[in-house]
Amino acid sequence: MSEPCEITLRINGTEHTVTVEPRRTLADVIRDDCGQTGTHIGCEHGVCGACTILLDGEPVRSCLMFAVQARGRAIRTVEGLQRGDQLHPMQEAFMRHHALQCGFCTPGFLMLAVGALEKWPDLGDEQLIDILSANLCRCTGYENIVKAVRAAAADMKARA
Amino acid sequence: MKPARFSYHAPTSVEEAVALLAELGPQDGRILAGGQSLVPAMAFRLARPAHLIDINGIAELATLQATSALVSIGACVRHAAFESDALPGAAGALLRKVVENIAHYPIRTRGTFCGSVANADPASEWCCVVAALDGVVVVRRRQGTRRVAAAQFYQGVMTTALQEDELVVAVELPMLPQGTRTGFAEFSRRKGDFAIAMALVAYRLENQAMAEPRVAVGGAEPYARRLPQAEELLRGRAPGAEVFAAAAEAAAAAVDPMEDINNTAAYRRALVRTLTRRALEGAT
């Protein structure tokens, strides 16, 4: 069917029932139809990583999936990181270490780093840098992003 | 840009998928697996399929099975599946060495081994693995199954023996004899970029001499293939710097490299020489 179809997406535990054409990417539907604009769209072809979300716990580029493919899956976006007024350790670390300037790439980096550390809490520096190389930042030059993610890794383990 | 309109089909069995493909393949229908090459092509509108047949909901295609003789990789097995210690033996070790070179982690969580094989990009690491190990591509259509050897499967840049009503359901690789040493080396300008060239080698030792040598090169030519000229120089010889250099030289001489705006044929030939030597020296 190329006609719009009704789908239900579960984003950060909340169900959003929307009617979308199959050609709509998950990134677009998360933002435009579900109103969760924390997920950013940069390149729209899978290079920049700004639209990274967690799909059943795994980091994926939400611009390289169609929304119809995400039915029944657990989607986590940057809006789902904080608990009440308490920021996620990764968000706190990004603030403390000045790991963002314009902030456009930040949601993607946060989801990538959180997804990787939830899976591998003991990531070494080399692996960490390798994983972070997936996403592009045009402001800070990565040093502070790496510092923040290292600090958050320790914090996440302490709180686990 | 945004992908053009298409009709979406989500079969839940292989039978249903090949029935859809028989009907929709001739009407510009395409298979959607991991989508990490197809969806960007659709975003650029380089690809505008009229129908997408999404095979991600077919549970039987998500299986990765190993016996003592071979490993069978189902069409929905993601690249990331090879990052763990799930596969035993020399073949498992080789796949772990190769997978970290494929794109980036969030791409590896979605992209599939068989999708990469069917897409047949010259720079695909998995295509190089399939060529090096003489893998078999298992292909289904409504009328039945056929098994295509790697040497017959690849025909050119992103061109394969696959017909429009055929679905790659699995790729089979030999498990490699115990003690087989493997090495892999590739070059790209940035981590995760498409490789400009790559080399994959395998051999085992028999009375200190190399037996069953395999040397394959990818990225340099329209499709990856074994280079018997290089293999012959290894067969029956003891591993060492001189014999490795000779085999690397033979590999460089044997290829007919592609040229593009950034890379001359001579540059790719030099890379083949260096990477073949590195793969041999690094083989474990």
Image (tube, grey):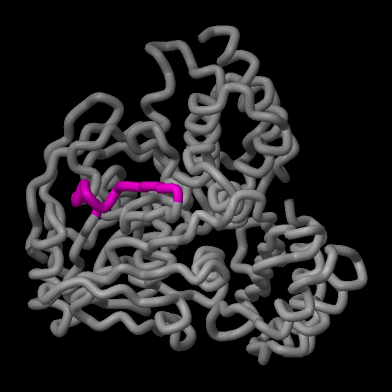
Instruction: Residue lying at the far right in this picture: please name it.
Output: B242
- The picture places residue B52, in percent across and down from the top left corner, at 20, 67
| Quadrant where the image shows the N terminus of chain A | bottom left
On whether residue B207 falls in the magenta region, the answer is no
Q: Pinpoint residue B106: horizontal percent, then vertical percent.
A: 48, 46
Outermost front residue: B207
Residue plotted at (44% across, 54% down): B69
Q: Residue at x 33, y 49 (%)?
A: A27
Residue B213 drawn at (x, y percent): 68, 69
- A159 or B162, which is in the foreground? B162
Tell me the magenta residue range: B56-68
Residue at image location 31% in from the left, 73% down from the top: B147
Q: Nearer the viewer, residue B191 or B159?
A: B159
- At x 66%, y 63%, the residue is B202
Where residue B146 sits in the image (x, y, percent)?
25, 75
Is residue A12 positioned above or below B54 on the image?
above
Is A55 placed above or below B79 here? above
In this view, B76 is above or below A105: below
Numbered-mark total? 0
Occupied quadrant, residue A7: top left
Decide whether residue B59 is among the magenta residues: yes
Nearest to the observer: residue A136 or residue A118? A118
- Residue lying farthest to the top in this orientation: A159
- Say which of B43 and A157 sits in front: A157
- Name the image quarter holding residue B212: bottom right
